[in-house]
Image (spheres, grey):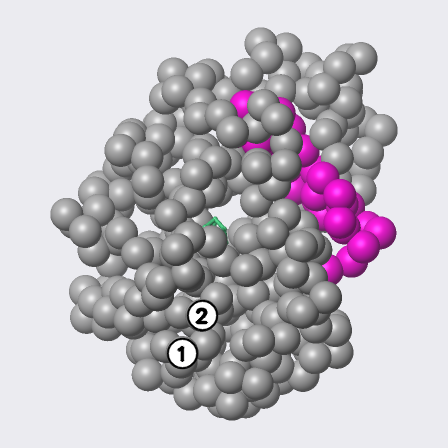
Amino acid sequence: MNYYASWEVVSYCDLACWHCYSTYEDRPGFSYKPTLGQIQQGLRNMRSAGFGFMNIEGGEPTLRPDVCEIIRACSQAGFETIISTHGLSLRREHLFERLLEAGLDALSLSLDGASPEVDNAVRRRHSGASSHHFEKVSEFMQWFDREKPPVRLKLNVVVMRSNLQDLYDNLGHLLRQWSSHLQVKLVQVHPEGRGRVNYEDLAVTPLEVQALATRVREQALDKDVRIRLHDPHVPYPFVIVAANGEAIVPCGERQETIVAGGRALNVLDEEFAAHFMEWLATNTWFAEGNRRINTYTA
Ligand code: SF4
């Protein structure tokens, strides 16, 4: 079995998006950055436990100077390797080419609006200033279309009140401008982290996300459009590895630490594989659900 996991390798981000799921600021001990050696150890332990897909995320993972070494470590450990990024740094000093050279298999790129006004208002700097995110992503996509690098590409779009109309009117048209094959995931905004603080203003319903998906599919026939809805009661079958190595399963508005062998499971623990398998034996929903999410890029 190749289970899917996502490791938050850095807690810091240079943006302050309204909906950010990060809860680091609220959780003492979680503003932690694992060393490359710890990551390598954790990766070995996770391979032994049957994990085969690794999404490297943050915070913003490209802020780590050793991000290429992390990707290389994942690849050398035998993982299919994905990075989730806001994308602002991908064209800086040929970072994306270096990530590819290190063994990257898939890129998960954020875009939360189909126009500069809407996307940049969501993906703002801590000061409130524009990050020019939309322009940077557009520039990257044009480069991607030209160069056709050997990597799978997914756009992650968080659907919220402030961007719903813009996405409905324009997202499909925008996607049609990009010739590359890509998957688009429309994610219902989730009441977590900063997203929880702003949830009343941001919330959209599952029906609104489904209607948007239908519209985008009509407008951009060649794109693979999927949705992820927020279910407040059902655990989502993949493991988030917190920056300190703790293994967590997202469950609606909560993140539940996996407890096995009488303690919180941590991928840095030498006995991680044995304890994870012990936990799996009594949580069969995980393997079944994880198999489904493995069939595409996260
Ligand atoms: S959503 Fe992503 S880019 Fe935005 S603040 Fe959070 S980690 Fe940074």
Instruction: Identify whether 33 is placed above or below 214.
Output: above
Q: Nearer the viewer, residue 133 or 217?
A: 133
Q: Nearer the viewer, residue 160 or 187?
A: 160
In the rendered image, is residue 57 in sight?
A: no
Magenta stretch: helix, strand or loop mostly: loop
- How much space separates mark 1 and mark 2, taking CA atoms? 6 Å
The boundaries of the magenta stretch are 228-255
Residue placed at 40% from the left, 69% from the top? Answer: 120
Q: Residue furthest front?
A: 127
- The amino acid type of the residue labelled 2 equals Ala
Mark 2: few/some/many CA within 10 Å (<14, 14-19, 20+): many
Q: Position of residue 113 (x, y in %)?
A: 46, 74
Q: Position of residue 9 (x, y in %)?
A: 45, 33
Mark 1: few/some/many CA within 10 Å (<14, 14-19, 20+): some
Q: Position of residue 140 (x, y in %)?
A: 26, 65
Query: Which residue position is annotated with label 2?
Result: 121
Residue placed at 68% from the left, 20% from the top? Answer: 265
